[in-house]
Image: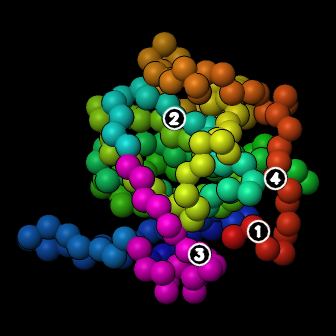
């Protein structure tokens, strides 16, 4: 697998080695050994999957301490724009984001470490989205910032009148009104 650093330290795009022939393709979607060798120690404990239609926007979500989560995400059907926003107090990239298009064709994966809010928009008719988490979901630790916060400068590639959000996702605070529970630690990067 090819690990592609992004503009924010600790956030990576992962490009698997895909073997194609007349029958189709094969690739290793995750290797604990390779992940830990190239990115860092991780213990994924939960896999999730969602199916959404065009215009659905989910996020920007995170789990509050002590139940923080790192995520490894991918789109297995369709196309999504996936985004990670740095919400670590004291980080030189606080409030900045990385966006990557994940598709069933490019097979890219996106690693979102702890201390980031995560979200995506669906750009195809439907999309099936999968992600691995390194802690279990705890509803009492659920958190978010507004996916429509214009100060973040995210182009979700969805016209506003076509955006479909859950009621919960319309109620998250703007980043400027958000008191982050995350703190930047350059040495550990909280992996």
Residues marked 1 and 4 touching at CB (< 8 Å): no
Q: Which residue range is magenta in the image?
A: 30-49
> Label 1: which residue?
189
Question: For the residues carrying marks 1 and 4, which lies nearer the camera in this image?
Answer: 4
Lower sequence index among marks 1 and 3 = 3
| Residue 185, x across and y down, in percent | 85, 66
> Label 4: which residue?
182
Q: Secondary structure at mark 3?
A: loop
> Label 3: which residue?
42
Q: Secondary structure at mark 1?
A: loop
Foreground of the two, 131 or 108: 131
> Label 2: which residue?
58
**One can see residue 166 in this view:** yes
Horizontal side, residue 90 vs residue 5: left or right = right
Q: Which quarter of the figure has residue 15?
A: bottom left
**17 w.r.t. 14: above or below:** below
Identified at 33% across, 39% down, the residue is: 51
Lower sequence index among marks 1 and 2 = 2
Question: For the residues carrying marks 1 and 3, which lies nearer the camera in this image?
Answer: 3
């Amino acid at each position: 697998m090819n690990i592609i650093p992004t503009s924010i330290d600790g956030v990576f795009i992962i490009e698997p080695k895909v073997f194609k022939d007349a029958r189709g393709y094969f690739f290793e979607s995750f290797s604990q050994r390779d992940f830990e060798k190239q990115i860092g120690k991780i213990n994924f404990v939960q896999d999730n999957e969602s199916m959404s239609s065009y215009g659905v926007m989910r996020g920007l979500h995170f789990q509050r301490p002590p139940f923080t989560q790192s995520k490894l995400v991918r789109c297995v059907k369709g196309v999504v724009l996936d985004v990670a926003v740095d919400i670590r107090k004291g980080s030189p990239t606080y409030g900045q984001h990385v966006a990557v298009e994940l598709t069933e064709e490019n097979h890219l994966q996106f690693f979102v470490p702890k201390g980031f809010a995560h979200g995506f928009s669906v750009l195809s008719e439907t999309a099936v989205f999968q992600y691995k988490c390194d802690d279990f979901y705890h509803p009492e630790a659920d958190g978010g910032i507004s996916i429509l916060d214009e100060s973040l400068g995210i182009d979700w590639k969805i016209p506003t009148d076509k955006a479909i959000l859950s009621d919960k996702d319309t109620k998250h605070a703007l980043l400027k009104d958000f008191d982050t529970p995350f703190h930047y630690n350059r040495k550990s990067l909280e992996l």
